[in-house]
Amino acid sequence: MNTLALVRVQARVEGVVQGVGFRPFVHRLATGLGLSGFVGNDATSVFLEVEGPESEVAEFLTRLRSDAPPLARVVAVAATPVTPRGSAADGFRIVASRHGETAATLVPADTAVCEDCLREMTDPSDRRYRHPFITCTNCGPRFTIIKAMPYDRPATTMAHFPMCPRCRTEYDDCLDRRFHAQPIACPDCGPSLWFTDGSGARTVGADAAIAAAAQVLRQGGIVAVKGIGGYHLACRADDDAALARLRDRKRRPDKPFAVMPRDLEVANEHAHIDQTERALLVSPARPIVLLRRRRDAPLSPLVAPGNPRVGLLLPYTPLHNLLMMPVPEGAGWAPSALVMTSGNLSDEPICYDERALERLGGIADAFLDHDRPIHVPCDDSVLQVVEGEVVPIRRSRGYAPLPIDLGRDVGQQLGTGGELKNTVCLTRGRYAFLSQHLGDMGSLESLRELDRTVSSLRNLYEVSPDRLGTDLHPGYATRGWAERNGRRADLVHVQHHHAHVVSLLAEHGRLGEPILGVAFDGTGYGTDGSIWGGELLAVGSDPSIFERVGSLATVPLVGGDAAVREPYRVALAWLRQLGVPWDPALPPVAAATDEERTMLLALMERGTRCVPTSSMGRLFDAVASLLGVRHRVTFEAQAAIELEAAADAALRGRFVRVGNPPGIAVRSDGTLDPGEHLRWLVACLKDEVPVESLALAFHEALAGAVAEAAMMTAPPRGIRLVGLTGGVFQNAVLLSLTRHRVRRTGLDVLTHREVPTNDGGLALGQAVVAALAGATPATTEPEE
């Protein structure tokens, strides 16, 4: 080779490029093109140098992006020409990791076991046959086992499992699929699996433990199964008695459970699955996907009582797959589908460590356990598909903590989130890192996990936040945490719905673009001290400032939180406010006892314990009760979910649509007034119009009102973009109808694609507002 014709390039690759087989990929690519040089990891990126003919080097740089491993996310490639060394004979090599950098690289998410590993696991001639912890460079645990970066074995929870000689050979062989696969293990050197029954007796050995667990499941028992990010509580999905016991012990009477079918074929027996939903189910993230349940699905009605949808997730660990297969020389039985719900008591974080025996002992009949430590607990992610577009509901395992590109540098900030479905968010430069799902903040255990998660993310990314963005609500535990852990001058109190709107802009990298944010949810503390939740907020070129340009008309929230648990209270408050008599024939009136009605009327007349609210979530509750769908709830949004199901039934043509109902009026000040529409619903009930038809009419009226309000408030302010955000827009019927109605006006519509529309995305908006607002609060708190 003529050295004068050679070029040499020094490059740095940023993104999710560690723990995903990127260095072996670079090695294969370079050697395949006949290039010399080296590649290695440091704490911030992958560094490399390549030398060879100019055309081959150019092709190499192009294919760094186009041919990257499936789990990699290349964000940037910075290449600089350097002087050629004429070292072609040296070949290409992988060099040792460099430490001591000032900022950490992007951390990979956990991924489902790959097809290659599954093939080996089911091959009797393979040395990892039926190994519950089989993994390679392309799959397995990542985020949940990483303690520090760079991502090398000593910095993971696998550090205490020394590799056997054969695993070490694979690990050191750059042509092997397990080259530098940090969780590499085999039956000779890896973690151990065991089964513990109700008496505490232990069964060791992978197959014996799996067979014992299968026997308990077969007999209708509940087994706590340790996975990648924590424990699941598992039982047969077709066993009414087992599910009744699980609901009773977990104190979860109605909230749907997720189901894990053996494979895609079984999944198709349970639900209608379109192409986009199928792609999600089999993706490396393996989330729970909300699907339309088949009427003849072989599932107990207790899986998701009163809900036409079911959440399915396919097996994503080797252990899950083994549990779904008959054990050789065993009883020959294996489940076709299991309920797999988070291993916790309701409203507590998922169990993931040695305390699981104590915390889950009152729920599970047995445990299928292992000794690979989990450093970061991580619940399953939940998604749905609406008109072909993915809508995240919970962003956790498989997605956290992958970066969100904000499109601009916002420095180092922290958002502490809200009170329900919580996450926290760190920013570093132009990237935001949203934590795994932490759940509700109502317990001491939840606050401990909040503290631990913030500490872990700060250490991973070496971030020291300049400011803390936190909710305006004085009673939120996350605000209390922020005030205890941040200096007062560094705290920025962010109004709840403002944070929702900014999170939507941030995930799309459109910060600074004017938007009319339609933020509909259950509860958010307003700048006037009332409870907001049906808001139209105009946000201009400075995302840290908003103007409230419209809202739902207010109604008294009688009894405070009790009204959230008992939707009939909100329905009665609306009826009284509209001057509609409490006719005993009306469902919400009949749902209340004489004593309850007397008490509620007295509170309303005196104005005692009656907080005014513009909450859209509470309007959905009121309509659900008014139509007789649901009067009392046992989990958040239960009434709204069942109202959506009724509307969906009508939308699919199973009920006649009502012609020309009155809409929800939009006043000149931007107020959405549902009064006439509610009066019409009452009249239709007396005429025995099907509830499903009325539920759809309400959804259509609300979608129309949003479009009308958008046209009234956005164009006069030079705004052409409308954002739909907040937990109410998890409602697929409402989201679809509203998106179509607004687009018909000529305005553009923005919806969530990466970050949950519910409070799981709140922390992102808080962190961004904190960055852009500086030390000055983004909103003014009401006077005490």
Image: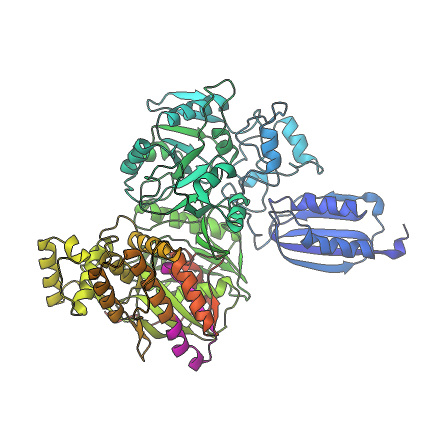
| Residue 718 is one of the magenta-drawn residues | yes
> Residue 28, relative to residue 165: is it above or below?
below
Q: Nearer the viewer, residue 192 or 730?
A: 730
Among all residues in the image, which is located at the extreme top? 329
User: In the picture, which quadrant includes the C terminus?
Assistant: bottom left
Q: Which colouring convention does the figure follow?
A: rainbow
* Residue bounds of the magenta highlight: 707-728
Is residue 494 visible from the viewing direction of this image? no
Total marks in image? 0
Q: Position of residue 657 (x, y in %)?
A: 34, 61
| Residue 343 is one of the magenta-drawn residues | no
Q: Is residue 239 left or right of residue 282?
A: left
Is residue 47 visible from the viewing direction of this image? yes
Q: Nearer the viewer, residue 618 or 625?
A: 625
> Residue 749, relative to residue 50: is it above or below?
below
Quadrant in the rendering for residue 589:
bottom left
Q: Position of residue 232 (x, y in %)?
A: 40, 37
> Residue 664, relative to residue 104: is it above or below?
below
Quadrant in the rendering for residue 678:
bottom left
Q: Position of residue 306 (x, y in %)?
A: 31, 46
Identify which residue is drawn at 46% across, 27% down. Answer: 334
Identify which residue is drawn at 45% across, 63% down. Answer: 503
Identify which residue is drawn at 73% across, 55% down. Answer: 61
Among all residues in the image, which is located at the extreme bottom? 716
Q: Nearer the viewer, residue 248 or 668?
A: 668
Q: Position of residue 389 (x, y in %)?
A: 50, 57
> Residue 124, relative to residue 308: is it above or below?
above
